[in-house]
Amino acid sequence: MTGVTDLIAAVATPAGSGAVSIIRLSGPGLLTALDQVLIGAGDLAKRPRSLVLAKAKDLSGEIVDEVLAVFFPGPYSFTGEDCAEIQCHAGLVTPNLVLEAVLGAGARMANPGEFTQRAFLNGRLSLDQAEAVAELVAAQSRSEAILARRQLSGALKERIDPIVRQLTALAATLTAILDFEEPWEETDKARLTSDLTRLQKDLDYLLTLRREGRIFREGLKIVIAGPPNAGKSSLFNALLGLDRALVSPRPGTTRDYLEAAVSWAGLRVELIDTAGLWAESTDELDQLGQDRTRERMSEADLILWLKDLTAPNPPSAPSNVLQGDLKEADNPADADIPVLEVHTKADLAQSPAALEPQALTISAKTGLRLDQLKREVLTILGVKAERPPELVPNYRHQKALEETAVFLNEAAKALADGAPPDIVNLEITEALTHLGQITGRVMTEDLLTEVFSHFCLGK
Ligand SMILES: Nc1nc2c(ncn2[C@@H]2O[C@H](COP(=O)(O)OP(=O)(O)OP(=O)(O)O)[C@@H](O)[C@H]2O)c(=O)[nH]1
Ligand SMILES: [Mg+2]
């Protein structure tokens, strides 16, 4: 890993309209650089962590803005280095003029995520906490924001660290047995076995939180599918509360799928409107549209299968769709995607008797039972609580937890098979390598790139 030695700067707020913009700096030589840019910079060192009124000037000496600046001396700053933030007027021009002045005074433009990366490299944040910074900023629902905030406060790290400590202690015990050729007593083995079982339970618990809480963290994908003209786009628009998709009595109106996000009970729900399946058309574009429908269906958390009761012989067998068409999408999980059959155009039904009493019958036109539809979707997906679990590991954490569990399992097996301590130790050391990647105790250049490549500028 490269040593961190230079002064970096970036605009930390989004470009465009707004009242205030923030230019962020971190690294050595910060006060010297600000001395060249800010008239009034002398107060920064005298009053750290307090707002200081100053004037920012460009290289020609022109005052470009009156600003508020604050100095956070290292090592107790966000990055662990000397840091500063300059608040100026927002817009397309002024923040960049201030940034240019700072760059002219010796700072380098920061890479995306570089501030947070420095915070990690300087031990101010663990890797999962650093990830949480990006997740908090990217959150699109209340539950996502809350989970990211908890992770940033160390909720996951506090669960991982004790497991790491206990595994390290087990490895140390095994090494001692090896080094001093101490007898490998049955009682030692029994204790080791019970320790391993306990730690496996801890990992299982975290993996359960992932399974149960994934949708609170990543949202839900709901695909609206069915034959042409079933009312898919009408339902899509009604659920969005927007006239987003084209609707017409002509079958085959929607050819390409459409996506839009809504919030249901604090969860991010991505709705996908698709081209109708089983169109009789032999048109190549229709076929391509249907292929996309099947692809989207194979990635869904739930499929709403629409059945237009006013149409002659509406196909009502989404399970056939799953077994037939979708299996070709070669995703083994396909068969498990729940399907909710929804009868549409209730307002056109001749008489209430024409409606199937068991079925969920809605009207996109009048809004009839759309709330019930949402409730049924959440119930089917097992969203029992309105609140997410205490913490939810992300996909990267899940993979690391699973790998750790594999090696702990191997260690337990080796122990049961009467393997020598060095073999058991090898498995435990492997487990530690994977577990350590969650908090970044174990780090590689690839992992660093993987995590920080998702960041945007100024974070
Ligand atoms: N009365 C009534 N008409 C509806 C309702 N939902 C859809 N329609 C009508 O049914 C026709 C087809 O609706 P769309 O929403 O375009 O159907 P679709 O399933 O998206 O159709 P394709 O994109 O062609 O596959 C349109 O004329 C809609 O106005 C409803 O709840 N009530
Ligand atoms: Mg449509």
Image (cartoon, rainbow, N blue to C red):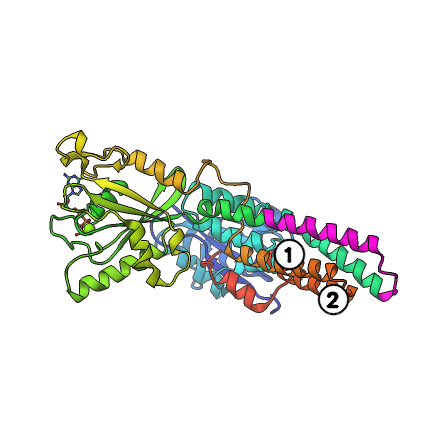
Kindly give the residue lying farthest to the top in the view shown. 352
Q: Residue at x 55, y 63 (%)?
A: 7
Q: Residue at x 13, y 46 (%)?
A: 312
As drawn, is 32 to the left or to the right of 238? Answer: right
Magenta part mainly helix, strand or loop? Answer: helix
Mark 1 highlights which residue? Answer: 123
Q: What is the span of residues highlighted in magenta in the rendered image?
A: 179-205
Q: Residue at x 18, y 61 (%)?
A: 286
Circle 2: element type: helix
Q: Is residue 85 visible?
A: no
Q: Is residue 353 visible?
A: yes
As drawn, is 140 to the left or to the right of 393? Answer: left
Q: Is residue 203 magenta?
A: yes
* The N terminus: image quadrant: bottom right
Q: Which mark is residue 172?
A: none
Mark 2 highlights which residue? Answer: 423
User: Residue 116 or 404: which is nearer the viewer?
Assistant: 404
Residue type at numbered disc 1: Gly
**Dot 1 alpha-carbon crowd within 10 angstroms: few under 14, some 14 to 19, many 20 or more:** some
In the rendered image, residue 39, in percent from the top left (x then y), is placed at: 50, 53
Tell me the CA gap for discs 2 and 1: 33 Å
As drawn, is 230 to the left or to the right of 326? Answer: left
The mark nearer the N terminus, 2 or 1, is 1
Residue 251's place in the image compared with 28, above or below, is above
**Dot 2 alpha-carbon crowd within 10 angstroms: few under 14, some 14 to 19, many 20 or more:** some
User: Residue 444 or 294: which is nearer the viewer?
Assistant: 294
